[in-house]
Image: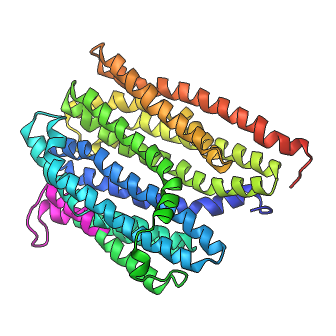
Amino acid sequence: MGTMPIPKLLLTMSGPMMISMFIQALYNVVDSMFVSYISEAALTAVSLAYPMQNLMIAVATGTGVGINALLSRNLGEKNYSMANRVAGNAIFLGLVSYVVFALLGLLGSRFYFSVQVEDPNIIALGHDYLSIVTVLSIGCFGQVLLSRLLQSTGKTFYSMVIQMVGAGLNLVLDPIMIFGLLGFPKMGVAGAALATVISQLAGTALGVYYNLRKNPEIQFSLSTLRPSKPVISRIYGVGIPSILLQTVSSVLIFGLNQILVAFSETATAVYGVFFKLQGFAFLPIIGMNNGMVPIIAYNYGAKNPHRITATIRLAVISALCIMVVAIAIFQIFPAQLLGIFQASPDMLAIGVPALRILSTSFFIGGFTIVASSVFQALGRGLLSMTIAIFRQLVLVLPLAYLFSRSGKLDLVWCAFPVAEVLAGALAGYFLWKAYRKVILPLEEQGYQF
């Protein structure tokens, strides 16, 4: 962290995270890709279901962040009794979260769709899909939280295997269960949901095995499963900001769906496709940021300002280069990207200009994402949350609604690049302030690497 050349160190730290995040992103895309072969209504239903799925993932991963931080700290302090208690409470919180979302899915999935669209076909398809992925969401929470326990003790390889097995199984099961191959009944959208939850359950089973057999630093018992208010408070003290950041994304998607569905249900499907394609475009940057944060945090603690600035500079340049490639792909091949999801002529007519307009926001967006991660590394997590809320709720949603009043759908897409420019300016200002107040004083004090 303190001596390896920055380019080599950043690549070493980021590589495994990029692979893991790519695998995780497959879950979001594979269902939509295969569902698009059923009908555009099925694709729209899955797109409308995504905010609720994203909310589940937000709760799981945010809780995992808190567990990871607290567990790692106790292991570093050799407080194995408390570490075991944290791990047991992780299982308890996963079960509680599952019960909450299972009840929401069981009682509210049809209502969730009926408040968004009037098409009874989309409501029925969406209800089938969402009720399955929520009522059987134990695998979603189990896979994420058990992987986090492995990461906390440095078993990142096993964590990656869990994700690879889950994503690979989902890829295999989707066509089999959707289209009724190999003797299975043809289940359509319900088959896509079942393929997802079965894959997550397989990942959970593997997580149980690895934690019991390959993770000796943690010992499970019935006594550690007993909920502890101090432990849970500390977990969510760290995890709630992460949950809120991802919840903002769910609110954005839900709100935009309501604006877009006023134009057509196809517009909603287009945005759902773009959101998932965008995820792949930003994956390398997000993976790089996961490697960048500990490098900056370590050198901040070690008072090595030159390594901090060198890491930030390299990350920003790399992000901008990645975004140039992504923009080129979206500008040149929008029809081909939409073709992955069996786009109809109507969907192409809406989607081709949409992808071209939306992708213009990538360049500044790449910088904003890196800047937000720098703030986290320097212990200024509130700045990251401020930028996310400012961009998605204060800017994108009001601008999209305002532009929608013109009756021109292409103007709604313009809300994204406009918001990204303003959010990027705020991120740049915060980054300059962080340099002046945090990094520059270290340089003036004469600290060298």
Seen from this angle, which residue lies furthest top? 406
Q: Nearer the viewer, residue 319 or 422?
A: 422
Which image quadrant: the N terminus?
Answer: bottom right
Q: Nearer the viewer, residue 202 or 56?
A: 56
Task: Judge from the rendering whether residue 241 lies leftward or rightward of residue 412; answer left or right.
Answer: right
Seen from this angle, which residue lies furthest front? 229
Which image quadrant: the C terminus?
Answer: bottom right
Q: Give the residues in magenta.
A: 174-200
Does residue 255 belong to the magenta stretch? no
Q: Is residue 336 visible?
A: no
Q: Position of residue 44 (x, y in %)?
A: 21, 41
Q: Position of residue 313 (x, y in %)?
A: 71, 43
- Residue appearing at x 53%, y 40% in the figure: 385
Task: Indicate the colouring scheme.
Answer: rainbow
Q: Is residue 382 visible?
A: yes
Q: Quadrant of residue 123?
A: top left
Does residue 197 belong to the magenta stretch? yes
Q: Position of residue 94 (x, y in %)?
A: 36, 65
Q: Position of residue 428 (x, y in %)?
A: 65, 31
- What predominant SS class does the magenta segment belong to? helix
- Residue appearing at x 9%, y 46% in the figure: 124
- Residue appearing at x 13%, y 60% in the figure: 179
Task: Judge from the rendering whether residue 178 lies leftward or rightward of residue 324; answer left or right.
Answer: left
- Residue appearing at x 62%, y 47% in the figure: 376
Task: Judge from the rendering whether residue 403 lies leftward or rightward of residue 106; answer left or right.
Answer: right
